[in-house]
Every structure is written in structure tokens, then in C-alpha cells.
Image: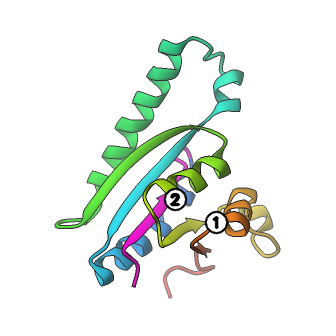
Amino acid sequence: MFRSVLLPIDLSHESSWRFALPEALACVRASSGRLTVITVVRDINAMLEGLYLSFQLEGAVAEARQRLAALVRGQDCEGLDISNEVRFGSIGAEILAAAEACQADLIVMQSHRPEMRDYLIGPNAAFVAQHARCSVLVLRQPANPAR
């Protein structure tokens, strides 16, 4: 079983967590482990949005922190050991750094590039799967979730 599970999500894409968050919670429940949910404020997005000053970056990170906390609070996670973290930088590199920091046994990610879902996993999921020092579970949402 897994003692420490890391779930990276993209707050701007529900498809990055809609299926993966319940799966990560199930892993944590089964093993009485700990879940760390992270989101990464991309450095390139900050530059494109004109967030150059430190107080602007702090504001973007604070907003992401609030949104992440609200998302996790909205889940059925009573009695589970869950922490939230917001990072700033390159998505793949920050996911790997977070996995090292929380000593993750498992990284759970959802691939969310629907236009290529039959052929490739997303570039961040592929990078993490290739470079992680722990197991990586890359999930795809079932084609027909009702079944």
C-alpha cells in the first residue's frame, strides 16, 4: 500500500482532477496514508499575464491556494490526512520536487488532452512518468463514465 500519495491538479481544468481526485482519495483510504494535493502556477503564464512584481505573483499564488483549499473541502475526505500545496514554476519539475518533498510512494495524475486521448498522454504526465522516482498512476477518464 501507499503511505504518501501526491495528486497534482490544474485548477483551470476540471478534467485534471474530476476522475483522479476520487481515485487518489480511495488509495489513501485503503492504506490509511496521506494525500498531498498540489497545483502549480506556471512561470510562463505569469509572464504572459504581466505578473512581474512580487506582490502580483503573491496574489496569484494566494488565489490558487484559496481555490485549491475550496476544491479539497468540497470532497468527502472526513478523517483523511490531506495537505494542499501551491508551487510556482515549471509544472513537471515542480511535481517531481513535490513528490520528493512529501516522500511520495505514488503520484496520481489524470491525462487531460482529449484531442489526443487515443494516442498520447499529456506532456506533463509523460514527463512525470518518465522521471519520477516513485510509481505514477496516469488515469484516463472512461469513455462512458456511466458504465
Total marks placed: 2
Comparing 67 with 36, the one in front is 36
In front of the other: 127 or 56 = 127
- Residue at numbered disc 1: 132
Q: Relative to residue 70, is residue 46 drawn left or right?
A: right
Quarter of the picture holding the N terminus: bottom left
Mark 1 neighbour density, 10 Å: few (under 14) some (14–19) many (20 or more): some
Residue visible at 57% across and 11% down?
53
Specify which label sits upstream in the sequence, 1 or 2. Answer: 2
Residue 99 - label: 2
In the image, taking residue 76 as reference, residue 111 lies left or right, namely: right
In the picture, the disc for residue 46 is none
Answer whether residue 119 is visible to the viewer in this image: yes
Amino acid at dot 1: Ala
* Residue 43 x, y percent position in the rendering: 65, 31
Residue reaching furthest bottom? 147
Residue at 67% over, 62% down? 128
SS state under label 1: loop
The magenta segment is: 1-12
Residue 114 shown left or right of residue 14 in the figure: right
Looking at numbered disc 2 in the image, what kind of residue is underneath it? Ala
Magenta run includes residue 8: yes
The answer to if 50 sits in the magenta stretch is no
Picture residue at 47% right of the left edge, 73% below the top: 105
Disc 1 and disc 2 in contact, CB within 8 angstroms: yes
